Amino acid sequence: MAEAIHVLEREGAVLVDPANLPSVIDRDPSKNVLLWETCSGINQGTGHDANCTSVLKYGMKRDFNAWVKTLGPSAPVKSLTELRIFNLTHTRANAIRFGQSNLDISDELDVERDRARYEADRAKDLLLAGDRGLKAALADNRVEALLFPNWNVSGLASRPGYPEIVVPIGVVSATAPASNPFPTGFQPKPTPYAAAFVGDACTEPRLIELAYAFEQATKRRAPPASTP
């Protein structure tokens, strides 16, 4: 990332550092977006999801059920519930090789009864990730885009629907968290690393210009051996 910043400066970009997101540095836990993660996994099911946004799991059930209805009688399953049951009855065929906990916690919700919770969480997402997050950082610092290491900001940018472009800048050694280490004897290959550019809503044309100019100035993407 230090090299990426150096390239931007060399090419004439005006950098503002730091360009803090107000909701990231807010000392009030209820207003800090880092403490308001997306509900995911069996540990954030119904009754254990007070401190995470239910937007993803609510929308998954609502939209999946709406989509399969459009398929008519030809749909192999008629609801998210039926999909989960199908997966469970076909575990020996690797139907859910990596589990389906996000489907499970989504299917727990009632689309009608839990709608008010969803709408409240959606409003909080827009406030913390948008108005008091990315939008505020862009406006307060008078910048066209924000630069982040790798694509970890994707979950944040997706909440208000802000555009993001990641540009490969190299590879790094793969690491695993202490709570979930790699299996004994497993030797991970180096993993791609990128610089992420995030812009305000509907600024895709300018963001593409910036990311493309950066890509041409660095040309660090290394196609995998499997790519002709």
Image (cartoon, rainbow, N blue to C red):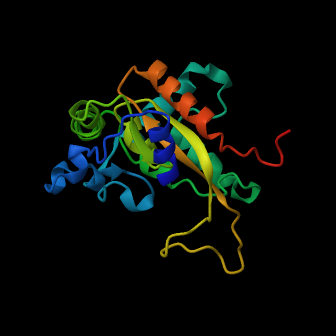
The reply to whether residue 174 is visible in this rendering is yes
Viewer-proximal residue among 196 and 74: 196
Viewer-proximal residue among 72 and 118: 118
Residue 126 left/right relative to 202: left
Q: Position of residue 17 (x, y in %)?
A: 31, 46
Q: Residue at x 26, y 30 (%)?
A: 142
Q: Residue furthest bottom?
A: 184
The image quadrant of residue 172 is bottom right
Q: Residue at x 72, y 79 (%)?
A: 185
Q: Residue at x 30, y 37 (%)?
A: 134
Residue 150 left/right relative to 94: left
Viewer-proximal residue among 110 and 212: 212
Q: Position of residue 167 (x, y in %)?
A: 57, 39
Q: Quadrant of the C terminus?
A: top right
The reply to whether residue 58 is visible in this rendering is no
Number of marks: 0
Reply above or below: 202 against 111.
above
Q: Residue at x 59, y 48 (%)?
A: 85
Q: Position of residue 40 (x, y in %)?
A: 43, 53
The image quadrant of residue 88 is bottom right
Residue 88 left/right relative to 143: right
Reply above or below: 78 against 202.
below
Q: Position of residue 153 (x, y in %)?
A: 42, 45
Q: Residue furthest right?
A: 228
Reply above or below: 12 against 57.
above
